[in-house]
Image: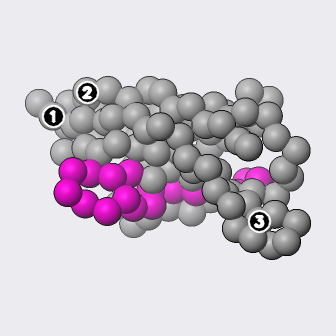
C-alpha cells in the first residue's frame, strides 16, 4: 500500500505560478512511475506529467515548456512546478503511483487531489 498526499493547490491569477507537492509513504517498490493528472469540471481525468523511478519524464502537450515534474528521493516527494498558468489549467490535480507487481499485474494508487483555480 502506498499513500499519497497532495498539497500546494490554491487560487492563482493567469500568468502566475504554483508548485504542487505529493508526499508518498515509504515503499520497497523499486521500479515505478509517478505522475500528475488533472480533472476539470465535466471532463475526464487527463495526464499532465509523469516521472519514472529512473528519472525519465513525460509531459502532455499542454504542459510542455511551462510545467516541470521532479522528485526528491530523500523526502520521498514529487513536485509539479507550474508556470505561466492559464485559466484552462483550473482542475483538481491528482498524484498517481503506478507499478507492476511480481505477477506483472499493473497496480496504482491515487492521492485525494488538490484544487487549482486560475482566475483573476
Please name the residue shown 48% across and 27% down the image: 7
| Distance from Cα at disc 1 to Cα at disc 2 | 7 Å
Could you tell me which secondary element the residue under label 3 belongs to?
Answer: strand
Q: Residue at x 77, y 65 (%)?
A: 100
Magenta segment, which residues?
Answer: 38-55
* Residue at the extreme bottom of the image, as rendered: 104
Q: Are marks 3 and 2 in contact (CB under 8 Å)?
A: no
Which residue is labeled 3 in the image? 100
Residue 74 seen by the camera: yes
Residue 101 place in picture, x, y as percent = 81, 63
Q: Residues within 10 Å of mark 1 (few under 14, many from 20)?
A: some
Of the residues under marks 3 and 1, which one precedes in the sequence? 3
**Residue tagged 1:** 119
**Relative to 47, is 96 above or below?**
above
The quarter holding residue 115 reads top left
Q: Which mark is residue 106?
A: none
At label 2, counting other C-alpha atoms closer than 10 Å, the crowd grade (few under 14, some 14-19, many 20 or more) is some
- Residue topped by disc 2: 11
Q: Are marks 3 and 1 in contact (CB under 8 Å)?
A: no
Q: Position of residue 89 (x, y in %)?
A: 28, 48
Q: CA distance from mark 3 to mark 1?
A: 39 Å
**On the rendered structure, is 114 left or right of 55?**
left
Task: Evaluate if marks 1 and 2 touch, with contact meaning CB atoms under 8 Å apart.
Answer: yes
Residue at image location 45% in from the left, 61% down from the top: 47
Quarter of the figure with the C terminus: top left
Marks 3 and 2, Cα distance to the nearest angstrom? 36 Å
Q: Earlier in the sequence, mark 1 or mark 2?
A: 2
Amino acid at each position: 500500500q502506498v499513500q499519497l498526499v497532495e498539497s500546494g493547490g490554491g487560487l492563482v491569477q493567469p500568468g502566475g505560478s504554483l508548485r504542487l507537492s505529493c508526499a508518498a509513504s515509504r515503499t520497497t517498490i523499486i521500479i515505478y512511475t509517478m505522475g500528475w493528472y488533472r480533472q476539470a469540471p465535466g471532463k475526464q481525468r487527463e495526464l499532465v506529467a509523469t516521472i519514472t523511478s529512473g528519472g525519465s519524464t513525460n509531459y502532455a502537450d499542454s504542459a510542455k515548456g511551462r510545467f516541470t515534474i521532479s522528485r526528491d528521493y530523500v523526502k520521498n516527494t514529487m513536485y509539479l512546478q507550474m508556470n505561466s498558468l492559464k485559466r484552462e489549467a483550473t482542475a483538481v490535480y491528482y498524484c498517481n503511483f503506478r507499478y507492476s507487481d511480481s505477477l506483472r499485474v499493473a497496480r496504482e494508487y491515487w492521492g485525494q487531489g488538490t484544487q487549482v483555480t486560475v482566475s483573476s
